[in-house]
Amino acid sequence: MTSHPQPETIAAIQQLYGRQSHLIDSGAAREWAETFTPDGVFDSPSYPNPVVGTEALTQFARDFAASAFAKAERHRHVITNLHIERVDARTLTVAAYLQIIATKVAGPSALLRFTTLSDTVRHTPDGWRVARRTVARDDAPLPQ
Amino acid sequence: MTSHPQPETIAAIQQLYGRQSHLIDSGAAREWAETFTPDGVFDSPSYPNPVVGTEALTQFARDFAASAFAKAERHRHVITNLHIERVDARTLTVAAYLQIIATKVAGPSALLRFTTLSDTVRHTPDGWRVARRTVARDDAPLPQ
Amino acid sequence: MTSHPQPETIAAIQQLYGRQSHLIDSGAAREWAETFTPDGVFDSPSYPNPVVGTEALTQFARDFAASAFAKAERHRHVITNLHIERVDARTLTVAAYLQIIATKVAGPSALLRFTTLSDTVRHTPDGWRVARRTVARDDAPLPQ
């Protein structure tokens, strides 16, 4: 049975998710990677394999920035609909919607894809960190 | 005269609205209906009549899910710009923007409609619940 | 060195930003202007010069509303990804994404532009107010 976390925990998670997008979107790759635990897992069907650990996550964020730059675009991670549940004193689950929005230089902005995050977040000596992120894409096949 | 609610009330409302979208969007129709009071009212110009009470709200959420599924789409309720005002110890008003975003299987995502929620939220033995939701569509005629 | 603000400060800022969009979008020009300090600065590349002070900000908000109305559109300021940092006891920085979404009467909704806000927010006798807002557009040229 999960329960509601304290208001200060909710505020801390809102800050974590608010900050996280600005980091990856502004090219702060290492700082973005460090919003995950050192053994943190990022598992998204948009990429061939799960990305595991600070070094790999840093490289992933660098590649994300380089890919947008090569297309003369800015890509943004828009987070909404945070819902936080307490699993135990040091573990939360966080659900959120994540939209990737791309803007061409001197051009229009467009919604590239719509996804849902299902995260496990763990309390560490450095504060709350994402231990595991699972991304589901809305353009995936529907369940039969 | 309205006033600002306490931080713990703001956190509770953020959790209610965060959770509510995930419920209707994932097909948890009954749980979505129970985020309203038992006599809760959902009044939207997108539907012919106001929907009133847990049973009717449950059926409404089922129809919403079935309609998206029939089109091979996922529909999401994206909530932003929550603004919460205290009316009295057991009553709040909540304003929010609600975007409906549709994604076709293997296809693009698109903003289906942009609406504003004007809600009355009531404290109940089960926590805060929506007593009345009034939806305004941005594609409605402008005031003269 | 910046640090995390208290949960009650985070809640107050969320309320300020939630309310601010509803004010300008509903035509409450003076109330919107008063979410800035009396000498508040709004600096956006979408407009020829920075807008400074309550009177000029009020006129700016009136012009924004009139411009949308003249096109038979509603324009909305969608705020996401708030990230708040404490500078000192009376000063915060706030980063956020701001999307402008336009809807034509009886027509579709579209993302008009995607921007990032970098704000300085100051505590005043009337609560937290925006002292300086700097807007960056995603369609601006990329750094070389």
Image: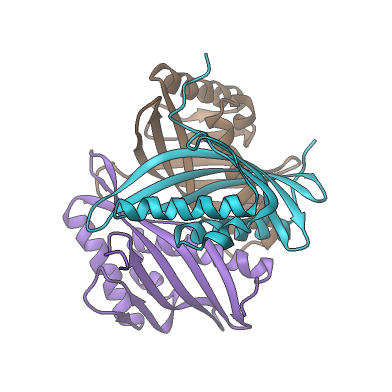
Chain colours: A cyan, B brown, C purple
Quarter of the image holding residue A72?
bottom left
* Rendered location of residue B137, percent (x, y): 35, 41
Q: Image point 55% across, 63% down: which residue?
A: C14
- Extreme left residue here? C70
Q: Image point 45% across, 51% down: which residue?
A: A63
- Nearest the eye: C61 or C144: C144
B23 to the left or right of C139: right
* Rendered location of residue C127, percent (x, y): 56, 77
Can residue C50 be seen at all in this image of the molecule? yes
- Nearest the eye: A52 or A22: A52
Q: Image point 53% across, 21% down: which residue?
A: B62
* Rendered location of residue A143, percent (x, y): 53, 18
Quarter of the image holding residue A129?
bottom right
Image quadrant containing the N terminus of chain B: bottom right
Q: Is residue A3 above or below residue C63?
A: above
B75 to the left or right of A2: left
- Nearest the eye: B87 or B69: B69
A140 to the left or right of A108: right
Q: Total marks drawn?
A: 0
* Rendered location of residue C33, percent (x, y): 38, 74
Q: Is residue B4 above or below residue C38?
A: above
Can residue B1 be seen at all in this image of the molecule? no
- Nearest the eye: B4 or B100: B100
- Extreme right residue here? A89
- Extreme top residue here? A144
Q: Is residue B32 above or below residue B115?
A: above
